[in-house]
Amino acid sequence: MSGKMNRRSFLKVMGWSGAGVALTGCDMPTTVTLEEGKEDVVSYLMPEEYVIPGVGVWYASTCTQCAAGCGIHGRVREGRVLKLEGNPDAAMNNGKLCMMGQAGVQGHYNPDRINTPMMRTGGSLTPISWDKALGVLEEKLGTVNGDRFAWFTGTISGHQSVLLTNHLDAMGSTNHYAHEVVNNAVSRAVNQDMLGEANPRLRLDKAKMIVSFGADFMGASQSPVQYAGQYAKFRTNKERGLLIQIESKMSLTGGSADLWLAIKPGTEAMLALGMANLLLNKIKISDAGIPADVRTLINTYDITKVARVTGVAGDRIQRVTQLLSERAPSLVLAGAGVEGQAQGYATTAAIMMLNHILGNVGKTIESAGDFPFPQLMAKQGGTADLVAFAKAAKAKKLDAVIFHGSNPMYSAPKSLGLTEAMANIGFKVAISQFPDETTMAADLVLPVDSYLEDWGTQVPADQAEANAIHVQQPLMEKLNAETKGLGDILLTLLKQRKKDDYGQFEDYYAYLRNAFSAMPTSVKNDAKSNDEFWNTALQTGVIKVDAGTKTLQSTVVSFAAPVEDDNAGLTLLPSPRLGLFDGRHANLPWLQEAPDQISKVVWDSWVEMHPDTAAKMGIGNLDLVEVSSAQGSVKLRVVLLKGMHADAVAIPLGQGHEAYGRYAKGLGVNPLQILDATTDGKTGELAMYSTRVTVKRVGPADSLSIVRMGTGAGDSQVGRKLVVTVPVEQVRRTEGT
Amino acid sequence: MVVKNRLINPGAGFARTGLAGMVFLVMLLMSSMAMAVKYDVVPPSGTHTGEDVPQPIEFPHDIHVKDNDINCMYCHTYARRSKVAGIPPTSKCMGCHKVIATDKPRIQQLTKYWEDKESPPWKKVHDVPDFVHFTHEKHLKTLAFDREFPVEDVKEICAFCHGDVENMTVANKVKPLNMGFCVNCHIANKDLGAPGDCWKCHK
Amino acid sequence: MSLDNILNHWSDYRKGSEEGGHHDYEHRWAMAINLDLCIGCNACSTACYAENNLAVVGKEKFEKGQAMHWMRIERYWDQQELEHPEQGASFLPMMCQQCGAATCEPVCPVAATYHTPDGLNAQVYNRCIGSRYCSNNCPFRVRYFNFYSYYESSWPEPMEQQLNPDISVRDKGVMEKCTFCVQRIRTVKDKAFMEDRPVQDGEVVPACAQACPTSAIVFGDTMDEGSVVSKLWKKHQVERGVYQKTKLAKKDADLRGYRIFEELNVDPSVMYLERVREDI
């Protein structure tokens, strides 16, 4: 390698000489040799004392692969981050990390990252310089004012969120649309009304029994690693916890249940009311705090009616309810399948009511206290904002929108008309890492750093008991000189509007240093100087904060009576999963190659159906079928699973990208596109789990990338002692649980 | 012994050697006759005629090691605490060469790299394939430190695999460094705990 | 290791295996996996991909069964006499069991796989000629063959910068499998050596154990009696050595610890704890 050896080529060179090929074949690049003078060995210029070539250094940072915000440790060798682990100092995840977190390095080193600003000229995006890009930005945003400007993001928190809010102020706008497909917006609304807090702290580890109405808390949830950790304690407590999962499609959490009950989609409210009926009228628990109209409603749901309508056997309902009254404290959870119904609020409220009746509030549902930095708290996404955004854009109310951390062009149902609506927005900016659908529809694209090379703070919405601000620091230098940090871009935007206020900060790093120094002493933990506080924060990756303790109120709000639907059709469940999540990780090969936990399919889409339902339609396993809603149809293969309700079909989310790089593009189908645009009346959230579909066989069975279990015998242990299940009584005797 | 505590003083040179220096030299000779070491080692055998590898700057080991008595580990400082011995960071070179021999053309080449904030793009001379795990620190511990081999003579240990570097300008590979070379030395020094297990070295 | 040598010492090798293998072990690495805590989330599997430079083979090759998942999560639906799917799924993390009497070791024509003094089943990539006899013999089906060279397809620039330099990237024609993260074991042992002290329990954490959100995987040295894994093995009365011994040794058949395919006499180093479910 001749000529200049700068940081970038240094990284390139070290990459090749770090780990080459074990054996050289004829057609292989020869990167491994014994020969003298073939490999480069680049020395440092002036390294820090602790940098020793050959010895890894670990740095703390924060994961941003989902909204959870787990603390991470990154292993860095010779200036490259290689492996991510959980940060043991982060109380939230206690040194553990899920598969999405592990795959973060693949996003960082992804070959399809955008490496240069781009502008739309003559219909296509062409590379331009940053100077030009910033000029265009200043010019275009300079003509827009007030609510004709908007930010469209995912869940966002920390100091980045502060800057974003400040920029909105500077633009005179109040339009911040926050959109997440995997969200708990409806639960937040119910919690706010019933408990006085939107995000109370859930304590699965304190519960003796959990009844989960489809809440996939260990999988695609707001904080999978945290809840999985709590689950482990739940199971290993002296009094071993009992998990009942009631849902229409078996989720990852459902896979670990002691009892999994299939329920007809859309009838969960009636089951909750039936259980309340038993608790109040049969088991005679006090009905204090329940409004009269709800009390009357409860009385109309007797066990026979509930069993008939929901499909859950009457004796099971009685047994579960009886146990709930005995095993206190318990916890009843409402999941996405419940929240995402046309009566999502009412159903979730009915389920939360059970917690009130059982006296769980204050025991397994705790107050999250008062987070001492409210401005840093997360602005959490949902789908109501997506609906509102599409409406505003369609009505030509928006002239300029900046997109970051969300992909509405992928996740919006076609029926919202977003593609057409976007055309009405004169100036669309995408601050983006990858060429996803929304980025490819933008007029100006600003390439952003990955989270592993950027500064920031993250404040998880679901905090552990030990509250913290999570610190994000670069684990290595930028891979590409042309990407900029999110905070830096935000500062630049602010300086364009408010030079006086922000001109003093050279970059986001300087802003953060200043912000940290300005924090109250109570948070600085006896640090003798601001430098010491900063260094400790970086070293541990967390700033512990005290949110204090509060008591939660527990009231039951009136909610609408369930609508009894006699429609005999099939309900489509667009199921997110731990892995591809809501589609954001379809460009990470490890996550594509990791089999879906329940169906074991890889690199593809599929639709899950109950074998009985399929048999009635003459559909066999792996047949090609067409799933049609009123909005459109998708063609994909069937996987027959008994872990389904007969009236439900589930298409897991994540595939069907039309852009987004080599790993994601053109693979599978996107069920979000064919959803009805029904919304929950109370919250405005999209009822994603309420679309009715028909299924038609269109082709014979063919191969599907499904992992074969064991030696290829299928899903059965064939009598071998592979996974053995033993009854809890046996363990109580031998292990004292 | 005084010898052990002697500070490495690059640039001391023979010119400064007085009577004390002579006494030191004699004692050095005696110590290197294996009197102070705790146990013997069998050096590896085998030679190799290496190619001349042109480096961006023709670094003269002879001037630094033989003439100025700089210890191997002064520059290749990571040898005692890492898998790799490491090429010294440019700041180490500049530590002396900011003032020493600044008129010489090679120093000026070096200074240009330093001012351009680049490291010279050195070429690797001694290499083992990427599937081999070789740790310098363990070898130094067993062959030098645990033996209480005088640190200032460590070049004799380094010479086991790197040859007579003090008489070279740029390094030249004069030992084969193939598996047989390593394994035979491990077999000969088995009682020192030299491993024979494949997975100790094959990654 | 010549054919002569194997033939002359075969009975010693067999006997040795029955009486606890080599008698000059440095460590005997073992795992205990609590199937009651395994939620089947795939964190361990993905962490293994990241740590061990595992190739992503893509859709077509995956369908042919050519995937390289050293640690895989198997999911079964049936359990003895318990109705499916009412008791959820049975998840089984399966990786090389590092058998004490491994069936893969004696059949390698070039002795590329053998038993190390650490109690691990070693795979030396350089020596492997790709006969695939070993994977044929493995009852757990945990050996993976590189049918293709994945270097360019799996790691398009700049993804190769993520590769772990402590472990090779395997080329076509080479067999590979879980190593209990031998590179991590090696690093810890080197550090302990440099500091003149023994390896402590909890120092070596394989990638899978480190990632697992429920801490279902416990790793350690059964030669260290104070280690967590030793205590677990002892508590559940699972012993190394062959089946008969374990069967007789286990005084309480209700204890949850067991090894898979115990009756095959391969002496795995992984103990599983039975999954627990409450029947209501």
Image (cartoon, coloured by chain):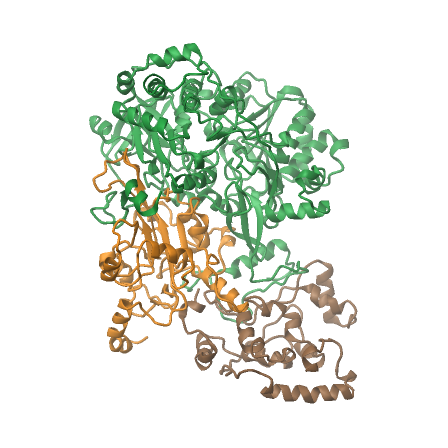
Chain colours: A green, B brown, C orange
Question: Which residue shows up at 60% across the image and 88% down it?
Answer: B33
Quarter-of-image position of residue A656: top left
Question: Which residue shows up at 50% across the image and 26% down it?
Answer: A382
Question: Which residue shows up at 40% across the image and 50% down it?
Answer: C217
| Relative side of A302 to A71, left or right | left
Q: Is residue B108 visible?
A: no
| Relative side of A541 to C53, left or right | right
In front here: A423 or C74? C74
Question: Against C80, is A51 above or below?
Answer: below
Q: Residue A208: x percent and y percent?
A: 39, 34
Q: Is residue B170 visible?
A: yes
Question: Against A494, is C104 above or below?
Answer: below
Q: Residue A700: x percent and y percent?
A: 23, 35
Q: Residue A282: x percent and y percent?
A: 32, 18
| Relative side of A138 to A427, left or right | right
In front here: A399 or A732? A732
